[in-house]
Structures are given as C-alpha cells and as structure tokens.
Amino acid sequence: MNTREMYDELKKAVKRTAPEKLALIDKPNQELVCVYPKSELEKALEFTAWRIAQDFKGKNPIMLCLLNGALMSYAYVATHLGNGFMMTMDYARPCSYHGDMTGGELEWKEKPHVDMTDRYVIIWDDIIDKARTMRAAIDFCRAQKAAAVFTGVMLDKQCERAPGCNIKPNYAALTVADYFVLGYGLDYANLGRHWDGIYAIKTKTIGLEPSEQEPLSPHRSSASLFTKMDLTGDYIPLPELADDQVRLSL
C-alpha cells in the first residue's frame, strides 16, 4: 500500500472513530510521506542500543518506558542490548497528549513501579518535541532519589522546546523536522501506531522540485553528535546540557 492509500485509510478510520478530529488531517494539499522506512529506523535503534549497552555495562540501570507511544521502540532497543546486559525494565503512563496534534497539561495515568534510590535511570520515549513530558519524568525520577537520570528517544524533533524544558536527549536514534509524525508507536487519534516506519503529515509544496523542499529529516542520526561526560563525577542536570549532546563515559 502506498502512502496516498495509507492516508486515505487513516482519514476513513478517523471519520469512523473520532470524527471531531478529522478536520486537522483533511485539509487541501496535505499528504502523507515516509520519513524513515523500517530498515533505516531499526538500524538507528540498533546503534542506539549498542551505545547504551556500552555505556551502562555492569551498571544495571532502570530503563523506564513511557507508554503508550514508546512501547515499540523501547522493546526493539531492549532486545538489542544483548543477553549479557543486565537492567531493570519498568514503565509509566504520563499523558500530555489528548488525541490531536498538540500537547496538553501532563497527567500521570500510571507512575513508575520500582525503587529508584541510588539507581541510574534511563527514561525512554518515542519522541521529544516540546519536552514537557520528559521534563516531568526527569523531575519525578530525581524526586525518587535516582543516582542520575538520562534520556533516550526514538526521534528528536527539531522544534522549539516549551519554557523550562530546554532538554536534549542523551540518546536520540534519529532526528526529524517539525512535522506531525506517525508510526512505530506514534499515533493520531489512537491510529497509525502499528505502521512499521515513520511517516509525516505535511502540506504539499507546489511548484518545487523534491531537492528544493524542506528536508523532513535534517540529520540522519544524532548518535554521532555525542560528547563525553564522566558519570563518576558530579551529576550535571540535563537542562544545563541543552547546548551539547551527552556521551557517557563509565
């Protein structure tokens, strides 16, 4: 099925299940385009898993999945950490997204379950954009007396963060331009999560050749942008590292 057919099916499903949300995706000149196919996305996730495994070898971190969106990428990363890698898996359900294209006020539908005291915690989410959810999750883990809190995402959206949320993730498999994206856990009105790649809803740029249009994926992978930080020293809160990607040195 091509992207035009996928988009048509999405709109039909939204019309059936959430008709009040149809207008946002049924505008003239909108189209669905593939940003990252499954093969490219999963290669980036595998590389990210390798990074995490190298950095946290012997540290037995807690890896916290933020449901629902992060489930698919979290599971993929977890199964590529290697059988010799030890960690504690946990999940939480913070909700700042209410089925449309904008985030709302954060609500904890389910909080983490394990004791974080003096443990390294890696928070994993599907995407970071305004970063309100990640900000709240970081603050929660710190309040639980975690030794240090780190962040990982499938996608780092290149957009302005919300006030007080100037966070760059420690691990980002891929970056994406400021479009509404679906697939591999990301949804619209609870639809499209199961798509096996990353797709963007964008307005067609009439009259421009593809090479002249704004790129959907400004960087193929942000994993190569890491700089070093010594975890054995004083912990530096993530917001102060907003201008630098973080590469752990354990």
Image (spheres, grey):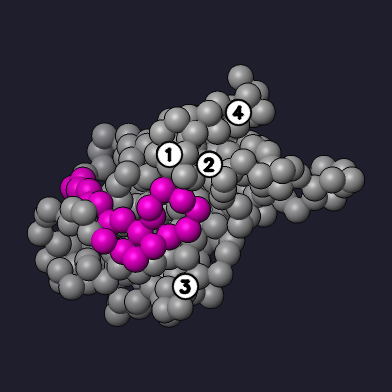
In three-dimensional space, the C-alpha distance between marks 2 and 4, rounded to whole angstroms, equals 12 Å
Q: Which x, y percent locates residue 196?
A: 49, 30
Q: Amino acid at mark 2?
A: Leu
Q: Which residue is mark 4?
A: 8
Which residue occupies 22% across, 66% down?
141
Query: Which sits in the foreground, 53 or 95?
Result: 95
Which of pointers 1 and 3 lies earlier in the amino acid sequence? Answer: 1
* Secondary structure mainly formed by the magenta segment: strand
Query: Is the residue under label 1 in contact with that under label 2 (CB below 8 Å)?
Result: yes
Q: Is residue 42 visible?
A: no
In three-dimensional space, the C-alpha distance between marks 4 and 1, rounded to whole angstroms, equals 15 Å
Q: Nearer the viewer, mark 4 or mark 3?
A: 4
Q: Which residue is mark 1?
A: 18
Which residue occupies 47% across, 44% down?
20
Q: Which residue is mark 3?
A: 162
Query: Is the residue under label 3 in contact with that under label 1 (CB below 8 Å)?
Result: no
Q: In what quadrant of the picture does the C terminus appear?
A: bottom left
| Residue range (magenta) | 88-107
In three-dimensional space, the C-alpha distance between marks 4 and 3, rounded to whole angstroms, equals 33 Å
Q: Residues within 10 Å of mark 3 (few under 14, many from 20)?
A: few
In the shown orientation, is residue 7 left or right of residue 77? right
In the image, residue 135 lies in the stretch drawn in magenta: no
Q: Which residue is mark 2?
A: 22
Query: Which sits in the foreground, 23 or 216?
Result: 23
